[in-house]
């Protein structure tokens, strides 16, 4: 799994931070310099932190855990939706529903409501309703799909969440903390890297920067999933080989027992 090089990060603008007056002092270890009143992120440290985060998220994917990707800012929505879908992971790109994690049971009920509406259309109940009722339910279904459709397959709490902007998604960060869910995030110079478990110092405003970091993370997830599949395939092959050995031993036992029985019969005769 190839990580983005420092040059690639430089070309994508990963190093551009916020204005000096907006900085968070906790980001001092990751700031290389100040240029024209803007902080510049040390890409060598970004590379090291990205590598650490990728290894951790790859291990999670390898063990079959789900990672929830979160980004509701406009320039990140399409990137998160595309990359998370590529590795079959849940994501949130619309408004973060309050209690998404801390009140997950209620969120699951809302998701099940979509299935109930779909069944109404299939079993004929839809046809017995008035035009006004159908319109109201259709609008409700569309709203649920927009807000929760991307997490429809999330049957239990995620094992980790990845966030593009920790300040904008502070509610998600707080909910994850309350439930001790590990957090991965792109952290710009105006944020506190201590708010998350795996902070990746980077520009969380530019689309190119977001795409580069998110793709590196989803590539790590894909690698973990591939390793998991390879491990399962090896287990299946090992079981098949074990079965063949058992069958072969049984056949060999039968072949050995058959001549012995013939010798005994001759002796009796």
Image (spheres, rainbow, N blue to C red):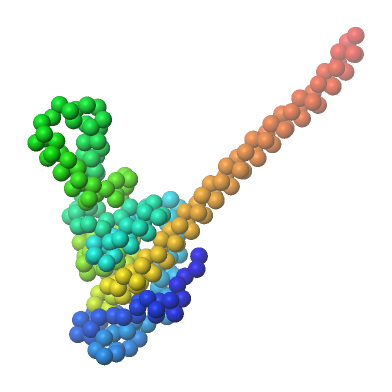
- Out of 94 and 200, give the one closest to the viewer: 94
Residue under the image location 79 percent in, 23 percent down: 257
Q: Classify residue 51 as left or right of residue 252.
A: left
- Whether residue 148 is situated above or below residue 24 in the rendered picture: above
Residue 216 in percent (x, y) is at: 42, 66
Dividing the picture into quarters, in which one does residue 115 lie? top left
Q: Is residue 91 visible?
A: yes
- Out of 73 and 39, give the one closest to the viewer: 73
Residue 185 in percent (x, y) is at: 32, 67
Report the residue that reaches farthest toward the front. Answer: 131
- Out of 102 and 10, give the one closest to the viewer: 10
Q: Is residue 104 visible?
A: no
Q: In the rendered image, which quarter contains the C terminus? A: top right
Q: Classify residue 260 as left or right of residue 185.
A: right
**Count of residue discs:** 0
Residue under the image location 32 percent in, 84 percent down: 40
Residue under the image location 24 percent in, 53 percent down: 101
Dividing the picture into quarters, in which one does residue 155 lie? top left
Q: Classify residue 268 as left or right of residue 63.
A: right
Report the residue that reaches farthest toward the bottom. Answer: 36
Residue under the image location 34 percent in, 72 percent down: 209
Report the residue that reaches farthest toward the top. Answer: 269
Residue 190 in percent (x, y) is at: 24, 77
- Whether residue 51 is situated above or below residue 238 in the rendered picture: below
């Amino acid at each position: 799994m190839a990580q983005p090089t420092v040059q690639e990060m430089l070309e994508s603008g990963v190093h551009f931070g916020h204005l000096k007056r907006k900085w968070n002092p906790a980001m001092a270890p990751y700031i290389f310099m100040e240029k024209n009143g803007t902080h510049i992120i040390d890409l060598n440290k970004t590379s090291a932190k990205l590598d650490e985060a990728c290894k951790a998220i790859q291990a999670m994917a390898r063990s079959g855990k789900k990672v929830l990707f979160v980004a509701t800012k406009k320039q990140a929505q399409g990137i998160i939706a595309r990359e998370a879908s590529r590795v079959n992971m849940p994501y949130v790109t619309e408004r973060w529903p309050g209690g998404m994690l801390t009140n997950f049971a209620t969120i699951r009920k809302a998701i099940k409501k979509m299935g109930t509406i779909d069944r109404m259309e299939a079993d004929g109940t839809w046809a017995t309703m008035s035009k006004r009722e159908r319109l109201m339910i259709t609008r409700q279904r569309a709203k649920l799909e927009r807000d929760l459709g991307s997490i429809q397959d999330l049957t239990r709490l995620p094992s980790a969440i990845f966030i593009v902007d920790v300040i904008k998604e502070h509610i998600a960060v707080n909910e994850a903390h309350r439930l001790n869910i590990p957090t991965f995030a792109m952290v710009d110079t105006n944020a506190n890297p201590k708010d998350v478990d795996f902070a990746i110092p980077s520009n969380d405003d530019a689309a190119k920067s977001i795409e580069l970091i998110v793709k590196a993370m989803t590539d790590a997830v894909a690698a973990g999933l591939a390793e998991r599949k390879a491990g399962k395939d090896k287990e299946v092959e090992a079981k098949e080989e074990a079965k063949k050995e058992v069958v072969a031993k049984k056949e060999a036992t039968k072949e050995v027992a058959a001549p012995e029985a013939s010798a005994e019969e001759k002796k009796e005769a």
